[in-house]
Image: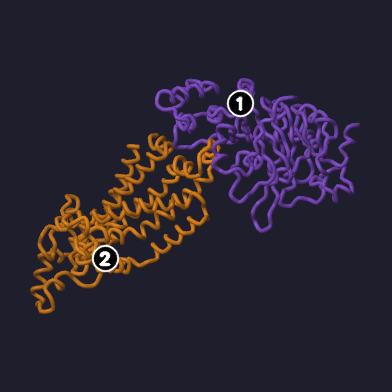
Amino acid sequence: MTDKLALSVRDLVVSTDADAPVRILDGVSLDVRSGRTTALIGESGSGKSILGSAVMGLLPDTMSAQGEIVFDDRQVLGIPERQRRALRGRWVAMIFQDPLAALNPSQRIGRQVGELLRRGGLRGKALEEGVVRLLARVGVPRPEERAHAFPHQLSGGLRQRAVIAMALSGGPRLLIADEPTTALDVTVQKRILDLLAEMQRDDGIAILFISHDLRVVSHIADDLVVLYAGRVAESGPARSVLSKPLHPYTRALARSVPSVSAASAVSDPIPGTAASPAARPSGCAFHPRCPLAREICRRETPQPREVVPGRVSACHFAEEFLDD
Amino acid sequence: MMSMIGRRLAVGVFVIWGVTTLMFVLIRVAPGDPATTLLGPDATPEQIEALTERLGLSGNIVEQYLAYLRQLATLDFGDSFRTGQPAIALVSSRLPETLQLTLGATVIAAAVGLTLSLLAARRPDGAIDRVVSTISILFQGMPTFWVGIMLILIFALVLRVTPSSGAGTPAHLILPAITLALPFTAIIARISRATLTEAMREPYVQTARAKGLSRGEALRNHAFRNAMGPVVTIVGLQVGALVGGAVVVENVFAWPGLGTLIVDSVASRDYTVVQAAVFVIALFVLALNLVADIVNALLDPRIRVEANA
């Protein structure tokens, strides 16, 4: 628990610049420690990908961010774009959901993987060797040959490996993985997760793993942050959060994961639909779907607070879960 | 790729046949006949009949058409009714001037149009983008004859830096090429801006930016090539249109090109010359479209593979 913080996000607010601004993220805080994985869990529209973009500094032009995003000890929110750009790829890198879309269709794999090396001054033979070494490292077989392939000529798994090689090419300290296995076959998913874990062990990279899939997350996460409608519902060590949720949303989420033996595909779905940040319910955003909702939940927005050491929950009645 | 080219050539033969047939019919349906036009108002009916006979226009239209097709198959277009020279020789004597003008205009339009679109697409709806749209609308909206006259006024008469009309030296080319290029520039700028803006939203551009590339670098190194497909297609089509559509510009600048020849030949009912000129232009348009398709295949490795299959 003494690992140093690679990324620290404090009270991050991301809002749209429209006339009626929407707070897509509303005061989100989370930490990612070096050599560890923090998983950011949420339904679609919860703002989890926006958080990834905000950390990268690649928010759409129509959105702006306030709060703190700290790399190591350095606040990066609000620094000039030129300085921010120098961190991208080299300090913080990103891998995306769909590797086919994330690769330029008209450039050979090697050129894309080697782009950062090239910008670092490598040329000719040294550049080629660097690319082959990167591809070999992420488990691409026959890397010399594959470097000359176009993205459409590779399988989904190999493409995602190439994307990971590209992300590793700048030697980042922090890796943002936005649903990196969602677009892949189940059999390939496990291998990509193993690869990420291996790279993390070797290089001590901090990983922010964005996902909607609790099962995937339970395999790889050290810490868990549960996002609901742009706010943190609960956070803490993954094992402890999953075994004993302190927020009704997390509990419902854990129950909705189908087990192999269950009769129906979704064992216990959460009633209602996910609240969107644009039409966030008053008080606790989860109250319309919450089986435990009381009067106060409608009126007062619960602030995230440490219920037991290391465990944060934003539920008025978090303590009641301790006794279950 | 070769099978694609083969297919396009086969289709091209039918297109040429269709275009020449249409032209053959249209020009004969139009009022007025060559013999009367050539001989003038004082001609006797006997003279007119003799000339009609000599020009090969006396039989019924089906016979004429079959004779025409037989000639066409051997690439014989007949002699000009007016001058007696082979029609194709008249056309090919004008071709270099037309190609010069078209090529000049295309180079200007592509260079300026692409530059404008690259500037605009860096920040869609930003200040530069708005200026570029305004310029595009202006370029496309100004009538060609007026632009030509204004350019002559400014550069030839007031500043005296270019010749006002005619052909012969590279300096003669400047004003007509610019005039012809303006609307074309606007088309290229608008289409390229649209496809570039779309490409900038693609995930692979986000990937590039996540590697630390600036907007401009991501635009040039990643979005540009993928965005050029539709632009190349439009340029191919438009260049074809320029070859035949330069009539107004050629008139304003007294440029001895194909456009002027066609207008004169239609006015004097010089059927053979019109037919030869239309044939050459159709051939040219087809060739350009083929080139555009080939360039597209080279731009996108995915098309290259499909075309090979």
Quarter placement of the N terminus of chain A: top right
Quarter placement of the C terminus of chain A: top right
Establish if A197 lies above or below B203: above
Q: What is the quadrant of residue B59 in the picture?
A: bottom left
Q: Secondary structure at mark 2?
A: loop
Q: Which mark is residue A192?
A: 1
Look at 37% across and 66% down and name the residue there: B142
The color chain B is rendered in? orange
Q: Where is residue B226 shown, x and y percent of the image?
A: 45, 42
Mark 2 highlights which residue? B159
Q: Is residue B66 visible?
A: no
Task: State the residue in front, A276 or B205.
Answer: B205
Look at 62% across and 44% down and name the residue there: A78
Look at 38% across and 52% down and name the residue there: B234
Q: Amino acid at mark 1?
A: Ile
Q: Which chain is purple?
A: A
Task: State the residue in front, A311 or B103.
Answer: A311
Q: Where is residue A85 shown, x and y percent of the image?
A: 55, 39
Q: Amino acid at mark 2?
A: Leu
Q: Are marks 2 and 1 in contact (CB under 8 Å)?
A: no
Mark 2 belongs to chain: B
